[in-house]
């Protein structure tokens, strides 16, 4: 899986906003505060925030006292929801859903690998919320993945 800059920046921005939400759910956070706090380019961030607003993940208010806040509690916003809002489906094969691709002959069962890959991604991304990340406490079913041999090692 390739995690795009849009998703990485979007998650960082949402975690910044979620930190403010946990202190005061009505607090609005300005885009420039997020950009400074997370070291993000403001113009790119503004586009991401617009997409997150359209997806119903955040709410914006204009004006001098304006800014952004979460539309829901951090415990209700999963990483999967953010990825889908910013980049589309979790797993696609040449732009198609994995269950819709067709293979023949020796590649006949490749579809099974792509569907299983999507299921594995869902298992993690649909079960981790902004609150989990802020608290540094991943769900118990996810934690063992971090301890698997080679989990932290790069493979080429």
Image (cartoon, rainbow, N blue to C red):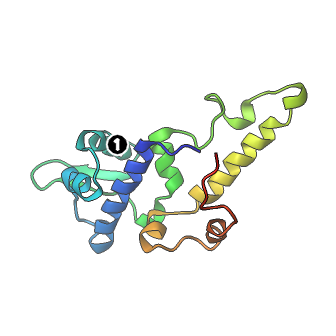
Residue 7, position as x, y percentages in the image:
44, 46
Dot 1: few (<14), some (14–19), or many (≥20) neighbours within 10 Å? many
Residue 96, position as x, y percentages in the image:
65, 30
Name the residue located 62 percent from the left edge and 41 percent from the top edge.
91
| 2 shown above or below 72 | above
User: Which quadrant of the rendered structure holds the N terminus?
Assistant: top right
Q: Which residue has dot 1 on it?
A: 48
Comparing 105 with 56, the one in front is 105
| 136 shown above or below 42 | below
| 22 shown above or below 28 | below
**Does residue 78 appear to the left or right of 99 in the view shown?**
left
Count of numbered tags: 1
| 123 shown above or below 135 | above
Residue 74, position as x, y percentages in the image:
41, 65
Name the residue located 25 percent from the left edge and 65 percent from the top edge.
26
Please, which residue is most extreme toward the right here?
105
Residue 22, position as x, y percentages in the image:
33, 71
Please, which residue is most extreme toward the top here?
104
User: Which quadrant of the rendered structure holds the C terminus?
Assistant: top right
Name the residue located 64 percent from the left edge and 61 percent from the top edge.
151
Comparing 19 with 73, the one in front is 19
Q: Quadrant of residue 5?
A: top left
**Does residue 105 appear to the left or right of 135 in the view shown?**
right
**Does residue 65 appear to the left or right of 145 in the view shown?**
left
Q: Secondary structure at mark 1?
A: helix
């Amino acid at each position: 899986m390739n995690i795009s800059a849009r998703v990485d920046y979007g998650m960082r921005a949402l975690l910044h906003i979620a930190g403010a939400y946990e202190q005061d759910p009505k607090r609005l956070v300005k885009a420039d505060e997020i950009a400074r706090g997370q070291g993000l380019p403001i113009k790119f961030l503004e586009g991401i925030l617009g997409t997150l607003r359209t997806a119903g993940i955040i709410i914006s208010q204009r004006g001098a006292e304006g800014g952004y806040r979460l539309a829901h509690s951090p415990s209700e916003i999963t990483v999967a929801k953010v990825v889908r809002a910013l980049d589309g489906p979790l797993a696609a094969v040449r732009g198609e859903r994995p269950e819709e691709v067709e293979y023949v002959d020796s590649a006949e069962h490749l579809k099974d690998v792509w569907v299983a890959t999507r299921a594995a991604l869902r298992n993690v991304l649909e079960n981790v919320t902004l609150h989990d990340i802020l608290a540094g406490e991943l769900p118990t079913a996810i934690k063992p993945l971090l301890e698997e041999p080679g989990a932290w090692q790069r493979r080429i």
